[in-house]
Image (cartoon, grey):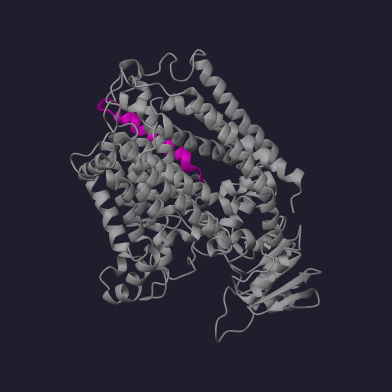
Amino acid sequence: MLDLSGYLLGVAEIGLLAGSAWLGATALRARLVPDLAGAPAHLATAVLTVASLLWAAELLGSFGLLDPVPYLLLVSAFGFGTWTLVRGWRGGRGAENGPGAPARRPPSPRDRTRGRALDVPAAVALAISGIAVVKFGLEAKPELSTGMTGFDSTWYHGPLAAGFFQDGDTWSLHRIAPQFLAWLYPANAEVPHAIGMLAFGRDVLSPLLNLGWLVGCLVACWCIGRPYRVAPWSLALGAIALSVPALSDQAGEARNDMAGTFFLLAAVAIALAQRERSSYPASGAALALGPAAVVGLAAGLAAGTKLNFLLPATVLVVGAGLAAPGGLRWRSFAAAWLAALAGGGYWYLRNLVHTGNPLPWITDLGPISLPGPEQALGGREGHSVLGYLTDGAVWADWFLPGLREGLTVLWPALLAAALAGLVLSLGRRADPALRVAGLAGMAAVLAWLVAPTSASGPGGMPRGFESGLRYLAPALVLGLAVAPIAPAARHLASALRSYLLPHSGKNHDRKGAQAPDPRIGRWRGVAAALVALLVVAVGYPVQRHYLEHRYADPSFATPGLDAAFGWAQGVADARIATTSTRQYPLFGRDLSNRVRFVGEEQPHGGFTAPATCPQWRRLLNRGDYDYVVASRDRMEPGKPAYPPSAAWTRGPWATVVLQVPPTAVYKLRDRLDPSGC
């Protein structure tokens, strides 16, 4: 449990980290995209803030130095240093008006009146998005009483984050269960979990992080429609897409689909926010590279989060250059590409160094052979949706029921509207940036179609199809968010707006326009401070409840694993060997247990489970373990109750802690004799 002082210390650390990073990001945003204002400006600042937190963690983690004090000092130095440097660069006259800044177009009547009154469409959209947030929060609530129970959270998201936290190392390969080469996955979404662990020494923030990514996605949806005056429609449709059952497993879990979707939507929103800038003055031409860099950064962050974002991120990076003014295309492309590498290239560079291949899942490119682990991917049998497209039986038995369960009974309308939004974005009358958004969405669809886990399972039985719809979700959300931007949709929205608000748009001349009341900003600051204090006050009893009940009485795995997970909550500072794919609960309540899947490192980053008793015992001796959790992942009819590793461990040197099929836990009292098998 965290006492009050420990809790407040963690809150203070998170506040300093976020505040320092936001301060530096605000200065960078004002330099790179000075024309942005309002929600798009805050969105760009958020992207830069997350990037700076990741960069600091990656820099320290590359040398095994990711610890609370060095991390806090580095982030603070970056934030305050960047803010001071940019202010000095501008001659102390502010980020918006310093020398070299582009000429800003004078505020139009529409700009001056925008946001001063909450109209009916905006109110409805905010209500729908509020329902989406509440729904997501209610879906996350059970995990606050049980701990994260999702398969992927307990298989690799949680263990990778806990490994970063324990070892202070992001560069080395944290080998987990040998399935899908998961220890080589990009990990932008796992680092924030590790940051929360650094602050609190516990994972109290982990069940709530995806709620933050959801809110970011909603803000990005609003910003996508904002330049076209259809922000409420984009927000409402995006909120509906983000609420489909296929994304419910993100709530309260460490899954990374919501984080990747945020970065993708943010890249599109920032690109579209530049559409009102018709040209760049000569004195500020170099600053045209700023928007491309921020778009590229957001796209790179998406690619560094999950593999299925690689293709749409590439489209966005290329498009950021093509959509730039004619004389700056090559430079804009270079800026976008370099920024994308900064956002996500770290993990692929790590893979290149460790395996000789940035994408070690791909070892054959036609006649070209690439290095990579020579081992089966393991896990579920891989199949893609594309491979089943013409299989009527699979459609009837799996795809249609899966679409109905994963996207609700309205799935035909949702998919049709999203596809229409993406296709219409490619029209000749569309802005270049909007065409890029449409292409990125289509690329996300293609990535889902060809993904080997989009229809995983035995041949003709794609049991993983419904779960794999989360790979389609980014395209669904983006397609619905851009759907109102099409000319026909905008005409309809304008007509509805005129009907609902017959006097809107009238009397908006310059003479009647008024500057925003400065008191509004002050009241917003007071309200934000009060909300923050309320969150901190409520957070204390919530985290105590969470830590008290976390994996105390688990019931989400096999009976044996559930018993082992509950047992581990009373163990601290132990070295635990395991054969279980799901291993995160074994790290213990305070995350002090060192948990390792017992395996042999192979060339090019490979990792395989031992096949013989002598090999098993040598690996146990090498790891100097205190406990062994030998288990199967599931009850399998016709197979022994316990895995072979249980018999390989049994002996006078091992004391049985618990035995519940298919799991046996032993306490090791001495080294095991490999010759005594």
- Whether residue 103 is visible here, answered yes or no, is yes
Q: In which quadrant of the rendered view does residue 493 lie?
A: top left
Say which quadrant the N terminus sits in: bottom right
Question: Picture quarter containing residue 294?
Answer: top left
Residue at the limit of the structure toward the left, as seen here: 428
Left or right: residue 584 versus residue 470 is: right
Q: Residue at x 76, y 62 (%)?
A: 571
Q: Position of residue 65 (x, y in %)?
A: 66, 41
Instruction: Look at the picture and state if 549 lies above or below 230.
Output: below
Q: Identify the image quadrant of residue 503.
A: top left
Magenta segment: 325-347
Main secondary structure found in the magenta portion:
helix
Residue 468: percent from left, percent from top: 41, 63
Q: Position of residue 315 (x, y in %)?
A: 33, 44
Whether 362 is drawn above or below 220: the answer is: below
Locate residue 673 relative to residue 420 in the image: left or right: right
Q: Is residue 200 above or below residue 271?
A: below
